[in-house]
Amino acid sequence: MKTKRSSKAFVIGASIVIVLLGLGMIELLLLRFSAGDVYPPYSSLRADPLGTKALYESLQGCCDLNVQRNYEPFSRIQERFDATVLVLGFDSQLLRRVPKNVSVEINYFISNGGRLVVSFMPVAKEKESLASILEGLGEQSLNLLDEWGVRIFYEPERTGSAFRGADISRKDLPASISTHTAVYFQPVHPGWKILYQRNQHPVLIERKFSHGTLVLSAESYFLSNEALAKERQPSLLMYLVGDHRSIVFDEYNHGISADAGVMVLARRYHLEWLMGVFLLIAVLFIWKSAAPLVKPEKETVEVQQTGKESTAGLTNLLRRNIPVQQLLSVCFDQWQKTAKEIPLEKKTIMETMIGNQEAKPPRQKDLPAAYNALGRVLKERK
């Protein structure tokens, strides 16, 4: 009984520990993902200073805009001509070698009315190692910077203020913005318009392509959560968004893609509680395997009577019907009946032995020894 109770207590305790551990892991994951520091810098899923979640949520609640995130290749949104696509925190070196099909999709989107805003990751100097790797990609890629008519350079000074271009007629834009990068542009095509420049070096430029527009920003800081808390520039942000009512934050360039897996579907349709249900089922299964939910009926213990051999039965019968002092006499009578003929001499010896044994006190009688002696006399030859 103690073993059954201790096993049940162990199962219950183990189940409670498993549930608590599962809930703790889920809570840690939720805390980690709520902060968003598992995502790359300038992702709209990050809520820390390096993310752009504040910008995403601000636009989502402003001016009746349709704000979305994109987790798929650019080919899926290349026909969203009514949208402004924000590619934030992009590596400027990657524009030097872009796959041909992606380059065609991007130019197709811009030329047909889309607005593309690309802000680069802040850097202190040129990544020569990455540039050498990109050079080895072969002829299957194109240099988008050359196609767009712009070049990228790096200057020693990476901090300071960038001032509004002299040709900008919109006075609602801020006079200056802070910069934290060494990257700057050199427009080659005359269609580029300089929005902001630092030390006479353009850091924010815009160009019209047929029916759409392209905006390149060497700086991403003013789009971050930290900047929206310390140096808000709402007029500049609304200018970047443009006249489109649909805003798409591209997360695919950060390596965040949508998989048509079970967990993705569960998160999309808010079925996170299913994890708790599966965990509960697992605990119940373990509990059921160790101890049944229904108390089993008590089994009646049947006393099995073991049988005895014929010798034991005969011995028991003799003990009940023949007194001990007559046992040798009875054996002698049976010998006389079964044996054909016992010589008179042997019969006299055996009768004498039986008489001597019966005359002894009970404590001195040794019936087995006397019986064996009678047997030896009986077996002796004449």
Image (cartoon, rainbow, N blue to C red):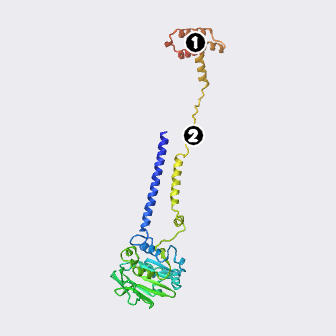
Identify residue for label 1. Answer: 326
Disc with the residue nearer the chain's start (2 vs 1) = 2
Query: How many neighbours does mark 2 have within 10 angstroms: few (below 14), some (14-19), or many (20 or more)?
Result: few
- Residue 24 image offset from top left, x and y in percent: 44, 58
- Say which of 355 and 26 sits in front: 26
Report the side of 121 relative to 379 (left or right).
left
Q: Residue at x 46, y 51 (%)?
A: 16
* Disc 2/disc 1 C-alpha distance (Å): 56 Å
- Residue at the far right: name it: 340
Q: Residue at x 59, y 20 (%)?
A: 316
Describe the element under mark 2 as helix, strand or loop: loop
Q: Looking at the picture, which amino acid does disc 2 mark?
A: Glu
**Residue 298 occupies which quadrant of the picture?**
top right
What secondary structure is marked by label 1? helix
Identify which residue, 288 or 371, lies in the foreground.
Answer: 288
Residue 238 visible in the current orientation: yes
Residue 339 vertical placement versus 288 (above, below): above
Which kind of residue does numbered mark 1 sit on? Gln
Residue 28 location, x and y as percent?
A: 43, 61
244 and 261: which one is in front?
244
Q: Which residue is mark 2?
A: 297
Q: Categorize mark 1 by other alpha carbons within 10 Å: few (<14), some (14-19), many (20+).
A: few
Q: Is residue 381 visible?
A: no
How far across and how far down the image is residue 333, in percent? 62, 12
